[in-house]
Amino acid sequence: MNEILKIYRVKDWVHYAGYILFGSLISGNINYTNFLIAFFMLAYAFSLNDYYDKKKKDKLFVLPLLFSFIFLPFLNYIQLFFYFSFIVIFTLYSLPSTYLEGRPLFSILTNSIGFLFIFLLPFTNIEKILKFLDFSLLLFLLNVTAQIIHEIEHYKDDRKVRKITTAISLGIKTSTLLLRLVLITTFLFSLSLFSRFNFISISTLLFSCYFFFLSYGKINEKFRKKFKIYGIVCGVLYVLDLLRLTS
């Protein structure tokens, strides 16, 4: 079991289960099928990335993709669009011929947009999506923040293998300034959400403010772990707020 979890990098993406939960609560479409498909989508994306980055021989990334196909008949055309958009984006992100991971700005945008499709997967109509477009934008900003932190932390390793990420292209100093700009934007945007999302707004205000000031120290593995852990805590508050709104 531990080997399977390692191969598919489950610990690196399990927190994104919160995204499928957010989408399920908002859309009112709560069923195990959406969760299973989301897990297979994430397992595919992360294991595919490992396959090319670490030059592995076993093409085990194919298995979660094949398993996800089994459940596609349970999705409507809107959900299928989100599913295939995710698969295409993260395939292009890792494939050597396109390798969006190694292209400045694209490395951030593909992740930030791509993971939104996990949140959107349970939605079966456009109206509900438009109604919660502000929440989608908040998740996008948080995704951007997470990816910039990831790239800054991996700066030395990426430079060794000549991977040209946004952080490599801009440099540590400018990337850190970009991180602070996104955190300020997230802070200001969360203010506008207070009248509608009380817990979400307050928790995001505190979260973005804390990491803004923390960014004046070292942005390393410890920083990133804190971001993930505190992000999960905020996610719990998000769930409570969404339960209040959708009950």
Image (tube, rainbow, N blue to C red):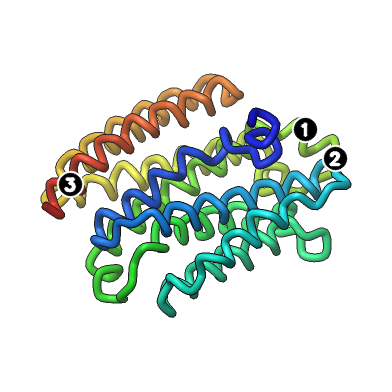
Q: Are marks 2 and 1 in contact (CB under 8 Å)?
A: yes
Q: Earlier in the sequence, mark 2 or mark 3?
A: 2
Q: Please tell me which residue lies in front, 56 or 206.
A: 56
Q: Earlier in the sequence, mark 1 or mark 3?
A: 1
Residue 37 in view in this figure: yes
Residue at image mark 2: 161
Residue at image mark 1: 157
Q: Please tell me which residue lies in front, 184 or 153.
A: 153
The residue under the point 52% across, 24% down is 223
The local secondary structure at tag 1 comes to: helix
The residue under the point 12% across, 46% down is 244
Count of all numbered marks drawn on residues in the image: 3
Distance in Å between CA atoms under marks 1 and 3: 41 Å
Q: Position of residue 90 (x, y in %)?
A: 64, 59
In the figure, 46 relative to 62: above or below? above
Left or right? Give the position of 94 relative to 198: right
The residue under the point 60% across, 24% down is 220
Distance in Å between CA atoms under marks 2 and 3: 45 Å
Q: Amino acid at mark 2?
A: Val
Left or right? Give the position of 115 relative to 153: left
The residue under the point 36% across, 35% down is 208
The local secondary structure at tag 2 comes to: loop
Q: Position of residue 14 (x, y in %)?
A: 50, 39
Residue at image mark 3: 243
Residue 103 in view in this figure: no
